[in-house]
Image (spheres, rainbow, N blue to C red):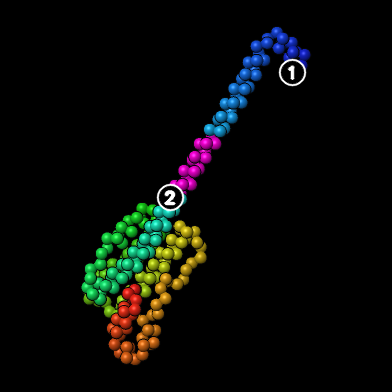
Protein backbone atom coordinates (compact mmCIF):
# COMPACT_ATOMS: atom_id res chain seq x y z
CA UNK A 1 0.00 0.00 0.00
CA UNK A 2 1.37 3.43 -1.01
CA UNK A 3 2.40 5.55 1.97
CA UNK A 4 1.36 9.12 2.35
CA UNK A 5 4.91 10.26 1.50
CA UNK A 6 4.93 8.18 -1.66
CA UNK A 7 1.55 9.62 -2.69
CA UNK A 8 2.96 13.12 -2.26
CA UNK A 9 6.05 12.19 -4.23
CA UNK A 10 3.92 10.69 -7.03
CA UNK A 11 1.75 13.75 -7.12
CA UNK A 12 4.85 15.95 -7.52
CA UNK A 13 6.27 13.72 -10.25
CA UNK A 14 2.91 13.33 -12.10
CA UNK A 15 0.74 16.33 -11.31
CA UNK A 16 -1.80 15.44 -14.07
CA UNK A 17 -2.70 12.14 -12.44
CA UNK A 18 -4.34 13.80 -9.47
CA UNK A 19 -6.39 16.16 -11.62
CA UNK A 20 -7.54 13.33 -13.90
CA UNK A 21 -8.57 11.22 -10.92
CA UNK A 22 -10.53 14.10 -9.45
CA UNK A 23 -12.17 14.83 -12.80
CA UNK A 24 -13.20 11.19 -13.22
CA UNK A 25 -14.67 11.17 -9.73
CA UNK A 26 -16.77 14.20 -10.49
CA UNK A 27 -17.97 12.73 -13.81
CA UNK A 28 -18.80 9.36 -12.29
CA UNK A 29 -20.59 10.97 -9.37
CA UNK A 30 -22.63 13.19 -11.68
CA UNK A 31 -23.42 10.32 -14.06
CA UNK A 32 -24.43 8.06 -11.18
CA UNK A 33 -26.78 10.65 -9.75
CA UNK A 34 -28.36 11.25 -13.14
CA UNK A 35 -28.75 7.51 -13.71
CA UNK A 36 -30.46 7.06 -10.36
CA UNK A 37 -32.80 9.96 -11.08
CA UNK A 38 -33.62 8.61 -14.55
CA UNK A 39 -34.25 5.14 -13.15
CA UNK A 40 -36.59 6.61 -10.54
CA UNK A 41 -38.53 8.46 -13.24
CA UNK A 42 -38.86 5.30 -15.34
CA UNK A 43 -39.95 3.12 -12.42
CA UNK A 44 -42.33 5.79 -11.15
CA UNK A 45 -43.90 6.17 -14.59
CA UNK A 46 -44.32 2.40 -14.92
CA UNK A 47 -45.97 2.10 -11.50
CA UNK A 48 -48.26 5.04 -12.26
CA UNK A 49 -49.33 3.56 -15.60
CA UNK A 50 -50.01 0.18 -14.00
CA UNK A 51 -52.07 1.83 -11.28
CA UNK A 52 -54.04 3.87 -13.82
CA UNK A 53 -54.68 0.77 -15.92
CA UNK A 54 -55.95 -1.17 -12.92
CA UNK A 55 -58.19 1.73 -11.90
CA UNK A 56 -59.51 2.04 -15.47
CA UNK A 57 -60.27 -1.70 -15.61
CA UNK A 58 -61.98 -1.60 -12.21
CA UNK A 59 -64.12 1.39 -13.22
CA UNK A 60 -65.17 -0.37 -16.45
CA UNK A 61 -66.04 -3.52 -14.51
CA UNK A 62 -68.18 -1.59 -12.03
CA UNK A 63 -69.97 0.20 -14.87
CA UNK A 64 -70.57 -3.08 -16.73
CA UNK A 65 -71.95 -4.82 -13.63
CA UNK A 66 -74.21 -1.90 -12.75
CA UNK A 67 -75.59 -1.91 -16.31
CA UNK A 68 -76.27 -5.66 -16.15
CA UNK A 69 -78.18 -5.24 -12.87
CA UNK A 70 -80.27 -2.40 -14.32
CA UNK A 71 -80.96 -4.16 -17.61
CA UNK A 72 -81.80 -7.46 -15.91
CA UNK A 73 -84.57 -5.63 -14.05
CA UNK A 74 -85.77 -4.11 -17.32
CA UNK A 75 -85.79 -7.53 -19.00
CA UNK A 76 -87.87 -8.96 -16.17
CA UNK A 77 -90.44 -6.21 -16.68
CA UNK A 78 -90.32 -6.71 -20.45
CA UNK A 79 -91.11 -10.41 -20.06
CA UNK A 80 -94.04 -9.55 -17.80
CA UNK A 81 -95.31 -7.18 -20.49
CA UNK A 82 -94.90 -9.93 -23.09
CA UNK A 83 -97.04 -12.29 -21.03
CA UNK A 84 -99.72 -9.79 -19.98
CA UNK A 85 -99.95 -7.52 -23.01
CA UNK A 86 -98.24 -9.50 -25.76
CA UNK A 87 -95.61 -6.82 -26.25
CA UNK A 88 -92.41 -8.15 -27.76
CA UNK A 89 -89.38 -7.47 -25.55
CA UNK A 90 -86.36 -5.65 -26.94
CA UNK A 91 -83.26 -7.70 -26.17
CA UNK A 92 -80.81 -5.24 -27.73
CA UNK A 93 -79.68 -3.29 -24.65
CA UNK A 94 -79.52 -6.45 -22.54
CA UNK A 95 -77.30 -8.15 -25.14
CA UNK A 96 -75.10 -5.05 -25.30
CA UNK A 97 -74.73 -5.10 -21.51
CA UNK A 98 -73.70 -8.75 -21.64
CA UNK A 99 -71.18 -8.05 -24.41
CA UNK A 100 -69.50 -5.34 -22.36
CA UNK A 101 -69.41 -7.61 -19.32
CA UNK A 102 -67.80 -10.37 -21.40
CA UNK A 103 -65.10 -7.83 -22.33
CA UNK A 104 -64.11 -6.71 -18.83
CA UNK A 105 -65.75 -9.09 -16.33
CA UNK A 106 -64.25 -11.92 -14.32
CA UNK A 107 -65.14 -15.57 -14.98
CA UNK A 108 -67.35 -15.79 -11.89
CA UNK A 109 -69.30 -12.63 -12.72
CA UNK A 110 -69.75 -13.70 -16.35
CA UNK A 111 -71.04 -17.13 -15.25
CA UNK A 112 -73.70 -15.55 -13.04
CA UNK A 113 -74.77 -13.17 -15.82
CA UNK A 114 -75.07 -16.13 -18.18
CA UNK A 115 -77.31 -17.88 -15.64
CA UNK A 116 -79.61 -14.83 -15.60
CA UNK A 117 -79.73 -14.76 -19.38
CA UNK A 118 -80.72 -18.44 -19.46
CA UNK A 119 -83.63 -17.77 -17.09
CA UNK A 120 -84.87 -14.96 -19.34
CA UNK A 121 -84.78 -17.25 -22.37
CA UNK A 122 -86.60 -20.07 -20.58
CA UNK A 123 -89.31 -17.72 -19.33
CA UNK A 124 -89.68 -16.22 -22.80
CA UNK A 125 -90.08 -19.70 -24.31
CA UNK A 126 -92.77 -20.62 -21.79
CA UNK A 127 -94.64 -17.38 -22.48
CA UNK A 128 -94.43 -17.92 -26.21
CA UNK A 129 -95.66 -21.49 -25.84
CA UNK A 130 -98.65 -20.45 -23.73
CA UNK A 131 -97.33 -22.26 -20.66
CA UNK A 132 -97.25 -19.27 -18.31
CA UNK A 133 -99.66 -18.90 -15.38
CA UNK A 134 -99.86 -16.74 -12.26
CA UNK A 135 -98.00 -19.30 -10.17
CA UNK A 136 -95.52 -20.07 -12.95
CA UNK A 137 -94.72 -16.37 -13.36
CA UNK A 138 -94.27 -15.96 -9.60
CA UNK A 139 -91.79 -18.86 -9.64
CA UNK A 140 -89.94 -17.49 -12.68
CA UNK A 141 -89.82 -14.01 -11.15
CA UNK A 142 -88.39 -15.34 -7.90
CA UNK A 143 -85.72 -17.28 -9.82
CA UNK A 144 -84.77 -14.17 -11.79
CA UNK A 145 -84.41 -12.10 -8.64
CA UNK A 146 -82.41 -14.84 -6.90
CA UNK A 147 -80.10 -15.02 -9.93
CA UNK A 148 -79.71 -11.24 -9.83
CA UNK A 149 -78.74 -11.47 -6.18
CA UNK A 150 -76.11 -14.12 -6.96
CA UNK A 151 -74.75 -11.84 -9.67
CA UNK A 152 -74.60 -8.90 -7.27
CA UNK A 153 -72.70 -10.96 -4.69
CA UNK A 154 -70.27 -12.20 -7.34
CA UNK A 155 -69.64 -8.61 -8.46
CA UNK A 156 -69.12 -7.49 -4.87
CA UNK A 157 -66.54 -10.23 -4.29
CA UNK A 158 -64.66 -9.79 -7.55
CA UNK A 159 -64.75 -6.03 -8.09
CA UNK A 160 -65.90 -4.13 -5.04
CA UNK A 161 -63.92 -6.54 -2.81
CA UNK A 162 -66.74 -6.88 -0.30
CA UNK A 163 -66.67 -10.26 1.40
CA UNK A 164 -70.02 -9.89 3.17
CA UNK A 165 -72.69 -11.84 1.28
CA UNK A 166 -76.12 -10.27 0.78
CA UNK A 167 -78.96 -12.67 1.48
CA UNK A 168 -82.00 -10.58 0.49
CA UNK A 169 -83.07 -9.64 -3.02
CA UNK A 170 -83.44 -5.86 -3.61
CA UNK A 171 -87.24 -6.17 -3.57
CA UNK A 172 -89.41 -6.43 -0.45
CA UNK A 173 -92.40 -7.88 -2.29
CA UNK A 174 -94.30 -10.57 -0.32
CA UNK A 175 -94.78 -13.96 -1.96
CA UNK A 176 -97.96 -14.61 -3.92
CA UNK A 177 -99.31 -16.98 -1.25
CA UNK A 178 -98.97 -14.30 1.42
CA UNK A 179 -100.72 -11.74 -0.76
CA UNK A 180 -103.61 -14.14 -1.25
CA UNK A 181 -103.84 -14.71 2.50
CA UNK A 182 -103.91 -10.96 3.13
CA UNK A 183 -106.58 -10.31 0.50
CA UNK A 184 -108.87 -13.11 1.67
CA UNK A 185 -110.85 -15.93 0.12
CA UNK A 186 -112.44 -13.83 -2.64
CA UNK A 187 -109.11 -13.30 -4.33
CA UNK A 188 -108.00 -16.85 -3.54
CA UNK A 189 -110.88 -18.09 -5.71
CA UNK A 190 -109.73 -15.79 -8.53
CA UNK A 191 -105.89 -15.86 -8.47
CA UNK A 192 -105.64 -13.72 -11.58
CA UNK A 193 -107.00 -10.75 -9.69
CA UNK A 194 -104.03 -10.92 -7.30
CA UNK A 195 -101.49 -10.36 -10.05
CA UNK A 196 -103.63 -7.63 -11.63
CA UNK A 197 -103.78 -5.84 -8.27
CA UNK A 198 -100.00 -6.20 -7.83
CA UNK A 199 -99.47 -4.80 -11.32
CA UNK A 200 -101.58 -1.77 -10.50
CA UNK A 201 -99.32 -1.00 -7.53
CA UNK A 202 -95.96 -2.17 -8.77
CA UNK A 203 -95.03 -3.14 -12.31
CA UNK A 204 -92.16 -5.34 -11.09
CA UNK A 205 -94.54 -8.09 -9.92
Residue closest to the far top: 13
Q: Which of the 4 quarters of the picture holds residue 199?
A: bottom left
Q: Nearer the viewer, mark 1 or mark 2?
A: 2
Numbered circle sitting on residue 67: none
Q: Residue at x 60, y 24 (%)?
A: 28
Residue closest to the far front: 201
Left or right: where 66 falls relative to 51: left
Tell me, yes or no, whether the highlighted magenta stretch contains residue 36: no
Q: Earlier in the sequence, mark 1 or mark 2?
A: 1
Q: What is the magenta range?
A: 39-54
Q: Position of residue 99 (x, y in %)?
A: 32, 56
Q: Quadrant of the C terminus?
A: bottom left
Q: Nearer the viewer, residue 199 or 134?
A: 199
Numbered circle sitting on residue 1: 1
Q: Residue at x 39, y 87 (%)?
A: 182
Left or right: where 167 falls relative to 119: right
Q: Which of the 4 quarters of the picture holds residue 3?
A: top right
Instruction: Decide if residue 122 is in sight here.
Output: no
The kind of secondary structure element at disc 1 is loop
Instruction: State if disc 2 and disc 1 touch (CB < 8 Å).
Output: no
Crowding near the residue tagged with mark 1, few <14, some 14–19, many ≥20 C-alpha atoms within 10 Å: few
Q: Position of residue 107 (x, y in %)?
A: 40, 57
Q: Position of residue 175 (x, y in %)?
A: 38, 80
Numbered circle sitting on residue 56: 2
- Separation (CA) of disc 1 from disc 2: 62 Å
Instruction: Decide if residue 87 is in sight here.
Output: yes
Q: Residue at x 28, y 83 (%)?
A: 192
Magenta stretch secondary structure, dominant: helix
Q: Which of the 4 quarters of the picture holds residue 131?
A: bottom left
Tell me, yes or no, whether the highlighted magenta stretch contains residue 50: yes
Q: Is residue 1 above or below residue 32?
A: above
Q: Residue at x 41, y 55 (%)?
A: 61
Amino acid sequence: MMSHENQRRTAKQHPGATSVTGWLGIVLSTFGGAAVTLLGVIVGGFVTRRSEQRQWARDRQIDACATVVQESTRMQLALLERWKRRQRPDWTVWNQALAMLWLVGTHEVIAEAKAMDRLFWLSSIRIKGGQMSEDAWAADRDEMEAARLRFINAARRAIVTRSAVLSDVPVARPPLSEVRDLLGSEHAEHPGSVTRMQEADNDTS
